Amino acid sequence: GAVVSQHPSWVICKSGTSVKIECRSLDFQATTMFWYRQFPKQSLMLMATSNEGSKATYEQGVEKDKFLINHASLTLSTLTVTSAHPEDSSFYICSASIPRQGPYEQYFGPGTRLTVT
Amino acid sequence: AQSVTQPDIHITVSEGASLELRCNYSYGATPYLFWYVQSPGQGLQLLLKYFSGDTLVQGIKGFEAEFKRSQSSFNLRKPSVHWSDAAEYFCAVGAREYGNKLVFGAGTILRVKS
């Protein structure tokens, strides 16, 4: 149980275009989902926390207009990288928490590799 | 500042040898502690977690970790490493003082030599 999927698993886009990444909780309802970014050989950095039906909370230094997060249902959150540039190339990982377990026990998706050319 | 420290960036052990990966965190209250493993290009898999109770916790794949409050540590151990354990390991801490989020260490890359 507690499976999280991401789609796509990898994507290549041209500079200036937008890319949408989906994060789904497959067998549970997730009121809270998290989006992380991981650069090569580095740790995960939290970008934002999204709660179903409300605006996402972004970490300091993350451009909310560039990384649009929508959490429209209890099983789906999306991250849209707008006007992507090569420096946005990274590995993006989402996670979800089960309400009764609290925010710290998170179930992670397999990640999405974004390459901007 | 809130931080989670994994002092070893790389560790190489021989197959069959024991393993200990270190993790220290800086701050006072009882945290929620996690160890995750990540294979290249993959997401994170939870190895084990500590919330309360017995300070020695058992996880999957033969891993265990011990919470030592006096040392603010949560070191991961395995008595006999297998080649398939080669991966990157992340320690993570959750606590109200950090907000409702996990803070990750920098990770330790484990190499296993045959």
Image (tube, rainbow, N blue to C red):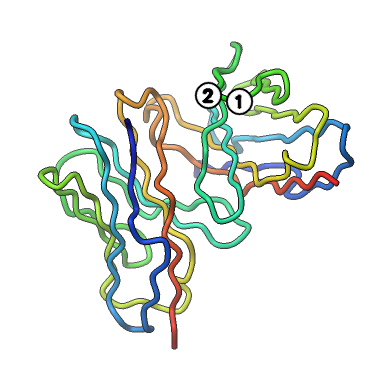
Is the residue B58 above or below the residue B82 in the image? above
- The circle on residue B114 is none
Instruction: Looking at this view, name the residue that lies furthest to the bottom.
Output: B114
Q: Where residue A3 sits: x, y (%)? A: 55, 43
Q: Where residue A68 sits: x, y (%)? A: 71, 22
- Looking at the rendered image, the quarter that the C terminus of chain B falls into is bottom left
Residue drawn where x is 61% and y is 54% of the image:
A40
Q: Is residue B15 left or right of residue A73?
A: left
Residue drawn where x is 22% and y is 53% of the image:
B57
Disc 2: which residue = A59
Residue drawn where x is 48% and y is 74% of the image:
B84
Q: Are marks 1 and 2 in contact (CB under 8 Å)?
A: yes
Q: Is residue B62 left or right of residue B54?
A: right
Q: Where residue A27 sits: x, y (%)? A: 56, 37
Is the residue B61 above or below the residue A9 in the image? below
Label 1 crowding class (10 Å Cα cut-off): few <14, some 14-19, many 20+? few
Q: Where residue B55 sits: x, y (%)? A: 15, 49
Dot 2: chain letter: A
Disc 1: which residue = A62
